[in-house]
């Protein structure tokens, strides 16, 4: 089965059809998706702003991440599920929407950036997370890339919604 066939199949599933044809289901799913994204971006921003030395300086970055990241992952799971449901309702059109494609690229960039930070930048966190220590340039760069990527994801998501009709 080619990609177009897979998209058509996905769009014809009972759940995709229910989301597409029900007058209130799509708006409810979209609302939950937006709320989940707000939590994802909000919690990530808290960590990023701490790494940049702009906010939450009275708490260690390690503790802040430990306290906040579980909420980020829970909200991300909800956003992924609701986003997938919305995508399935019109998969053939979403897949060809340039803004949606760029949004997915930015999501991958945000994920790779986070993975690199957690694999490498967090290694010596005990050294640079001490009181009075300066956050390394690499951690600050990861935070800046993260903020820019998530702002792009949100902007492109809104743009996708406005260009689908």
Image: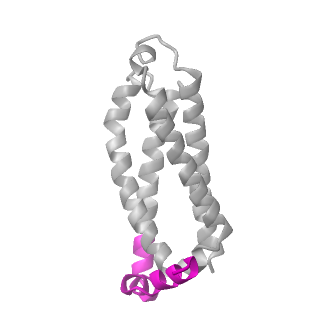
Does the image show residue 54?
no
Eyeballing the image, is 121 above or below 16? Answer: above
Eyeballing the image, is 38 above or below 98? Answer: above
In the image, 42 versus 135, the foreground residue is 135
Magenta-drawn stretch contains 13: yes
Magenta-drawn stretch contains 60: no
Position of the C terminus by quadrant: bottom right
Relative to residue 47, is residue 155 drawn left or right? right
Q: Give the range drawn in magenta.
A: 1-30
Residue 25: percent from left, percent from top:
39, 80
Q: Which residue lies furthest to the top in this view?
A: 132
Dominant SS in magenta: helix
Q: Which colour scheme is used?
A: one colour
Residue 133: percent from left, percent from top:
48, 12
Q: Which residue lies furthest to the right in this view?
A: 98
In the image, 85 versus 43, the foreground residue is 85
In the image, 26 versus 13, the foreground residue is 13
Q: Within the image, what quadrant is residue 129 found in?
A: top left
The residue at 50%/73% (across/down) is 87
Residue 28: percent from left, percent from top:
40, 73
The residue at 48%/83% (across/down) is 11
Does the image show residue 94?
yes
Residue 97: percent from left, percent from top:
65, 72
The residue at 57%/48% (across/down) is 109
Eyeballing the image, is 20 above or below 111? Answer: below
């Amino acid at each position: 089965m080619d990609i177009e066939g897979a998209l058509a199949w996905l769009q014809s599933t009972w759940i995709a059809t229910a989301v597409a044809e029900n007058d209130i289901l799509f708006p409810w799913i979209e609302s939950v998706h937006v709320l989940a994204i707000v939590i994802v971006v909000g919690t990530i921003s808290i960590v990023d702003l701490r790494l940049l030395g702009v906010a939450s300086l009275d708490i260690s970055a390690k503790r802040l991440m430990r306290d906040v990241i579980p909420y980020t992952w829970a909200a991300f799971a909800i956003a992924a599920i609701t986003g997938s449901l919305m995508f399935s309702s019109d998969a053939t059109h979403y897949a060809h929407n340039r803004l949606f494609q760029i949004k997915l690229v930015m999501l991958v960039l945000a994920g790779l950036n986070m993975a690199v930070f957690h694999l490498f930048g967090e290694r010596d966190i005990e050294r640079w997370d001490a009181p009075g220590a300066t956050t390394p340039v690499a951690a600050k760069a990861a935070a800046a890339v993260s903020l820019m990527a998530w702002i792009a994801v949100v902007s492109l998501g809104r743009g996708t919604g406005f260009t689908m009709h």
